[in-house]
Amino acid sequence: MKPFSAACERNKKPILKILREAFTAVRTVLEIGSGTGQHAVYFASALPFLSWQTSDLAVNHDGISTWINEASLNNLREPIFLDVGMDEWPLSAVDAVFTANTLHIMPWHSVQKMFQGVSNILEKNGILSVYGPFRYGGKHLSESNELFDQSIQIQYEGAGVRNYEDVVAVASEFQIKLMDEFEMPSNNRLLLFKKANPETKKGAYRS
């Protein structure tokens, strides 16, 4: 049976609105944690000028492939195995990385490893897009986010909604600088980062 995420259906259009502008000069994208595959199909279809590489743990590959095979898009790639804790990632270079709802279901040391891995493969001026819930100053944006945080901490060891400030700080340690952030549905945020370079200016992607 083809997997389905109601959350993906709700957030795909608002995310695409940002990616259309942020990924204008992008040609190769790695999606970390493709999940059901819904985002990959939707974004690859809407952005035919780029090559979208799906990735996830092996347990999710069959579901992702089901979506990919049904869509039959020339610019959408079959999933590759990627655990962010791997020392050697299966790709050597990409223009952009996209990940949604992943930081809060992995332990913090994996979040750190993810940014390290992204920094290693992201080309100069490359873009990283991170979607999901965040705490600001240690506080949740809503009661529903707080309840969600409590539930995932029970489900996944080391999980939890991350502090925005901590995420930005660890990204900076690996030369990935915050460019912009956007309010999204259901009290989520989309953060746009760029591989550090002297010309980086905050707010470059504000629509």
Image (spheres, rainbow, N blue to C red):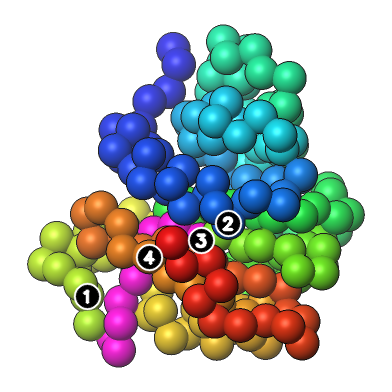
Mark in front: 4 vs 3: 4
User: Dot 1 corresponds to which residue?
Assistant: 140
Left or right: 43 in relation to 10: right
Which quadrant, please, contains the C terminus? bottom left
Q: Establish if 112 lies above or below 91.
A: below
Residue at label 2?
Answer: 22
Tell me, yes or no, whether the highlighted magenta stretch contains residue 103: no
Secondary structure of the residue carrying numbered label 1: loop
Classed neighbour count for the residue bearing mark 4: other residues with Cα under 10 Å, few (<14), some (14–19), many (≥20)? some
Inspect the image, locate mark 3, and give the three-letter code of the amino acid beneath it. Answer: Val
In the rendered structure, which amino acid carries the disc numbered 2?
Answer: Ala
Pair 1/3: label in front: 3
Does dot 2 land on a helix, a strand or a loop? helix
Question: Which labelled disc corresponds to residue 130?
Answer: 3
Asked where in the image residue 156 lies, by quadrant, the reply is: bottom left
Residue 153 screen position, x and y as percent: 32, 64
Mark 2–mark 4 distance (CA, rounded to whole Å): 12 Å
Secondary element at image label 4? strand
Which residue is farthest front? 207
| Residue lying farthest to the right in this orientation | 92
- Residue nearest the viewer, comparing 175 with 117: 175
Where are the magenta residues, as a range? 130-138
Q: Can residue 189 be seen in this view?
A: yes
Give the Cα distance between marks 1 and 2.
27 Å
Compute the Cα span from label 1 to label 3: 18 Å
The N terminus: image quadrant = top left
User: For mark 2, does the 10 Å Cα neighbourhood hold few (<14), some (14 to 19), or many (20 or more) residues?
Assistant: many
